[in-house]
Structure formats: structure tokens, C-alpha cells
Image (spheres, rainbow, N blue to C red):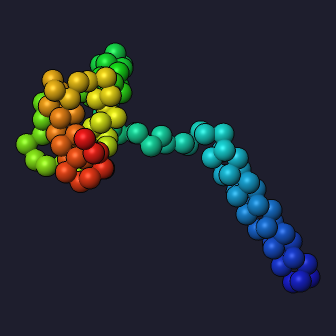
Amino acid sequence: MNATVLTCALCIAIVLFVATVYLGGARRLNGSDHVPAHAGRTRSSVSVEALFVRIRTEMQPPAITHVARPRYLTVPEAHREMLRHTDCDFRRCGRKAAAWDALQTAGVIRS
């Protein structure tokens, strides 16, 4: 009789454990006790329109300046400047003139 009581008690304990784990897991899957990651934080005061304006301005390519740099250009920098200022005249564009001089000094351009 003791073995039967122990077996029944063990079966009841197993059933209760499985039911608790299953129902607890099902409740979590349903989202009933779900806490969002942003809980407790206040919302930002930035509007959606302000975010769109910032994104648009940051995505625009920087304006090309034609003023010469105050330092000597390396050959790769000079190549990049020559490509950026393809449509410029090197006699009127300081950047292209500096790039031209750097490439000429390096022996890349012969004139």
C-alpha cells in the first residue's frame, strides 16, 4: 500500500509540474505577462517630421568647395580631387590647381 500511495503522489506531482510549466510557457507565448523593452522610458520629444528633415539633410552629398587646401595633397588625394573637379578649369578652381600641381610634382602628369 505504501508503494501505491507513493506512486500516486509521484504521478500527481508530475502532472502538477507539467501543467505548471506548460501553462506558464503558454501564458508567456501569448504575451500576457510580456514587458516591452522600452517600458519605463519616456518618449523622445523629437517629432517624426524633424527626424525626416534630419535624415534628408544628412543624406545629401557635401557641397564641393573650390578653395585650395592649405596643405600639400598626396597622390591619391590629388586623384580624388581631379575626379571631383572634372568639369572645373584648373586656372579658376583652387582645388583642381592644387591637385594638378601635386600630380605634376609627383611625375604623374607631364606638361
- Residue, far bottom: 2
Q: Nearer the viewer, residue 110 or 81?
A: 110
Q: Position of residue 26 (x, y in %)?
A: 70, 47
Image point (16%, 26%), residue name: 91
Image point (27%, 45%), residue name: 110
- Report which quarter residue 42 is drawn in: top left
Q: Position of residue 33 (x, y in %)?
A: 55, 43
- Residue, far left: 70
Q: Position of residue 17 (x, y in %)?
A: 73, 63
Image point (89%, 83%), residue name: 3
Left or right of 67, for residue 2 = right
Q: Nearer the viewer, residue 75 or 19?
A: 75
Image quadrant for the C terminus?
top left
Left or right of 72, for residue 52 = right
- Report which quarter residue 8 is drawn in: bottom right
- Residue, far front: 111
